[in-house]
Image (cartoon, coloured by chain):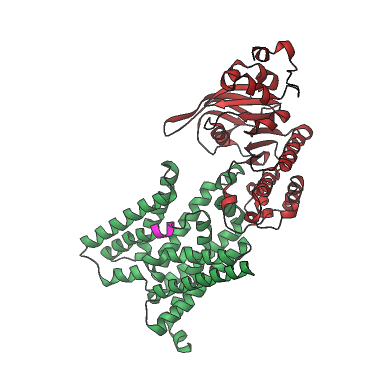
Amino acid sequence: MREVISARDVCFAYARVPVLEHISFTVEPGDYIGLIGPNGGGKTTLLKVLLGLEKGRGDIKLFGTPLAQFSGWDKIGYLAQKSPVAQSRFPISAQEVVLMGLAGRGARVGRGELKDVYDAMQQTRTRQYAGRIFHDLSIGQQQRVLLARALVSKPQLLILDEPSTALDAQSREMFFDLLGELNSKHRTTILLITHDTGEVGKHISKFMYVDKTLVFFGTKQEFCHSQEVAKKLGPFAQHTIDHLHNTHGHCPLGADCRECHHG
Amino acid sequence: MVEFLSYGFVQRGLLAGSLVAAACALLGVFLVLKRLSLIGDGMSHVCLTGVAVALLTSTSPVYMSLPVVALSSLGIMKLTQKFRIYGDAAIGIVSAAGLSVGLLITALAGGFNTDLLGYLFGSILTVTAGETMLCAGLLVLVAGGIFMGYRWLAATCFDEAFAHTRGVPTQAVNTVLVLVTSVAVVLAFKVVGIFLISALIIIPPVSALLISRTFKQVLWLAAAFGVGSVWVGIYASFVLNVPSGAAIILVNLIFLFVCYAWSKGVHRG
């Protein structure tokens, strides 16, 4: 099956200061990837470069098409770390915010689009806010409406930049359940930046660790064994994040897990 | 009042003023939203270069200013995008360049004269029939553009990065927005004068924003405040014998205070 994202030798610099160096990876359909790394490690920049919001060097393909020629934006849902919509004082309803997710379909609202908006708001349990002014909603409610905006085009790839930071415990659980359902039932590919490492390890299938370079990209089991990750995080954090360990602190990999035994 | 309306130049001034004020207010809604509202101020200073060249060469200040201001507006965009300069700083750079070149040409041509002062402070009652037609064309362009491209325009102004990831041609939307704004600025300098154009772009949308509950309401009310300020301002200038440009802006400020008081009252209620 066609790769969802293919990145080859991607580099990016702000005013000659390198932020990303020689990053290459491939995202397969159905992957659920947790993108982690230190603050300032280039995670958000990497997502922006992949989406063409920042011009980097290297070869990027989305769904097999080079980024410069890519036009199937309905296949991608994006939720940024901070949305200017949330900072605007202009009176725009939550429903209009979600409708923006379909703006690529044409300059005017098409038939049937309100049904898609209704479905997306139902999915994120925000239908009751449809007519409310967006900036009157709480930050957590706004975040769920913005998630509905990312979902409204029924994307095959979801790119999310720290989506759960503003959510309370209940909303966070609902949020990760929804992502899990999208991934397992609809095979939606998910690339998710998060510092919510206590939660994310339960849900994802792969980890990507970026600290200017691609330190690690692989399955949770490979993460558990990775020397590079151990060097960056230390064995304790490494094994807490990957969630392969049971509640008693035992690693299910047992004697095979060198890191545990080193710890 | 009847006598006032019976003069041909007053009718033309009211019509041209209403058309350009509505266009400026509608554009202003999107510019305020994009935090680019001072672009009108920057472009109006660049107008001085166009006016100075026109007075030097005895050509039409409006037609001479159009290409100069349009190119400057594209310059502001390039500065923000290519050189990663903040929008307000880019506007400041282009504005200073426009003002200094205009003053230099004026000095070389023999200093200020009454014609130039007329453009600095507005001379709405000298608007020609051709310029009135241009104002009508501008409003049709602005209103038609908003009607046809509302979603792209709103998406780009609210959240440009997200709009880009939806496939919205944000670069084209921005270019059209600043180019149309440059035309509006050039046509507005006869109405309120170079110094006060930005007020016609900023104050009506801000007033409307204070009391509106939907985005479409902001658009309608901003246009209504712009047009209302021209009518009340010109009448006040006729009765009180004061400059029309200043009167129009002061009426806009009164609208702003009333809207502010109204919004406070609503919140208390």
Q: Colour of chain A?
A: red
- Quarter-of-image position of residue A196: top right
Residue A108 figure quarter:
bottom right
Residue at the spot 29% in from the left edge and 62% down from the top edge:
B52
Q: Colour of chain B?
A: green
Front-most of residues A248 and A73: A248
Q: Is residue B24 magenta?
A: no
Name the foreground residue: B151 vs B160: B160
Please report the residue visible at 25 percent of the width from the left and 70 percent of the height from the top. B113
Q: Can you say whether A258 is above or below B236 in the image?
A: above
Provide the residue span drawn in magenta: B38-42
Decide: is B110 above or below A201. below
Horizontal relation, residue A20 to residue B82: left or right: right
Is residue A105 at least partly visible in the picture?
A: no
Q: Is residue B220 above or below residue A65?
A: below
User: Picture coordinates of residue B178 (x, y %)?
Assistant: 47, 55
Position of residue A150 measured from the top left corner of the image (x, y, whole percent): 67, 43
From the image, give the main secondary structure of the stretch colored magenta.
helix
Between B117 and B132, the one lying in front of the other is B117
Residue B214: give x, y in percent of width and height: 63, 62
Q: Residue furthest right?
A: A185
Where, quadrant-wise, is the C terminus of chain A in this rendering?
top right
How many labels, in total? 0
On screen, B93 above or below A200? Answer: below
Q: Position of residue A40 (x, y in %)?
A: 52, 32
